Image (tube, rainbow, N blue to C red):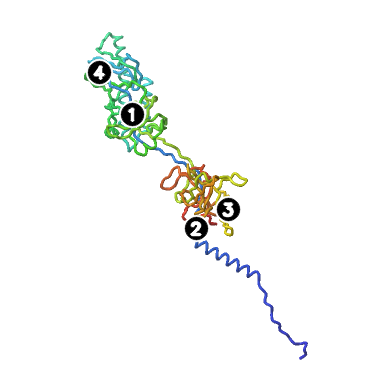
Amino acid sequence: MSKSGRVVKFKRRRTLNVGIIIFLILFIYISINIYIYFTKEHISIYEVQEGYNTTNSRVTGLILRQERLVYTPKAGYIYYFLKEGSRVAKNSTVFSVDDSTDIMDYITESDDMLMLSGENSKQLQYEFKKFYSRYSDYDFTYVYDFRSDVESTLIEMLNQAMIEKGRQIEENTGFRYSYEVFSSDTSGIVSYYMDNYETVTRETVTKDMFDTSKYKSIPLRTTEMMAIDTPVYKIVTSETWSIIFPLTDEQYEKLQGKSTIEFTILNDNFTVSAPVSIYQNPLDSAYYAELTMDKYLPNYLKYRFLDIELHFENIYGLKVPLSALTTKDFYLVPLTYFTEGGNSNEKGLVREEYDKDTGDVKLLFTAVDIYYQDDMYGYVDTNQFSPGTWIRSTDGNRYQLSMTGKLTGVYNVNMGYAVFKRVEILYQNEEYCIVDKNTSYGLSLYDHIALDANTVVEQKIIY
């Protein structure tokens, strides 16, 4: 076999596969990140939104008016000339008394019918509509009120119709009936209800009076014969009236320093403001509030108690979950040690630094943020200075950083790491708080914060 026919085997040169290496690096990187993702504690992020809270308080108020009962000086059947809530001038006719039933018998025996006027018909329709809008299967109070209102309205209509009919009969037939007319001795507003609270004053009000289950309003208009010295109507002699209610400790604190307050009368959802005063009753040593009004008296003439809602204040700010709150220590630095340094207007502190080689003391200016200040101290982040650092004031005094105080805040994570932001709480309940949106070094609308402050460490990267 010739030499040219030999086959010579050469060792094959090994080469690195770049694609495999890159794949392995990526695989290891992804594996590490997957491991970190499943083993580290995850941080939930909350976006700060605007929020508000209205602090209201519902109470039952007792109405006090300048009022007195008027009694009939004569026994007989009472016929009224005025309707409920009418204003009457001094010496104006209010009612008449007939000591017999002659005119009544004459009218009822005649074939003429007593017709309702247009105004009377509208009044009845109003009572029916009011009852329909207020009726509830769970509260029959409106049923009794409706019955009383309708009876009162019908009696008023009957009295007016009988008086007019009696005058016509007297003119047409000459028949005379023995009634006597009585006038008011003062001006005021007429009411035909009594409840034995007419003589109550703010000095004699006690908490027992606010038990509405024992309250009873008695209508004074009736078709029955009245004995002498029986109350026939009530007259309110002043437009000024008041609403009084006992105070809880919380309500007492919130009303301190207020001269007026806005409130809603829940009986008809009417909102109004009125002067308010607080006093202590010597009878039971309890504190009461008095709302004084000089308008709207006729609207609540038939009421003795009103359900009202006090509007203390509306709190607006940023809504933050309580779980996001945390506290942080800050150095307390006397305000006299803050100065401006360099070529800027930045506030800062002049700290002492020792040269290890020469032993000389150098004075270095460090710009700082004052997170909060009171009358004596500014709050400086403890991360900027080591404990025990000495600082100097412009007049040469020295102060060692050691005393600390706590501020409440949250961890802002807008930049991918946790930064402490101070908050000032305006309102707080069991789930969240409303914080001031204008706090220096505080939060802004739509900031991202850690939902649970216990899951992050300040300045640590979280993404």
**Lower position in the chain sequence, tag 1 or tag 4:** 1
Say the numbered circle drawn on residue 42: 2
- The disc placed on residue 72 is 4
**Of pointers 3 and 1, the one earlier in the residue sequence:** 1
- Which of the numbered marks, if any, corresponds to residue 137? none
Q: Are marks 2 and 1 in contact (CB under 8 Å)?
A: no
Q: Is residue 114 above or below residue 417?
A: above
Q: Under tag 3, what secondary structure? A: strand
Q: How many marks?
A: 4
Which label's residue is closer to the chain start, 2 or 3? 2
For badge 2, the amino acid type reads His
- Name above or below for residue 357 compared with residue 185: below
- Percent position of residue 458, x then y: 51, 54
Q: Position of residue 7 (x, y in %)?
A: 73, 85
Name the mark on residue 63.
1
Query: For this view, does 296 lie left or right of residue 147?
Result: right
Q: Quadrant of the C terminus?
A: bottom right
> Looking at the image, which is closer to me, 285 or 14?
285
Disc 3 to disc 1, C-alpha distance: 76 Å
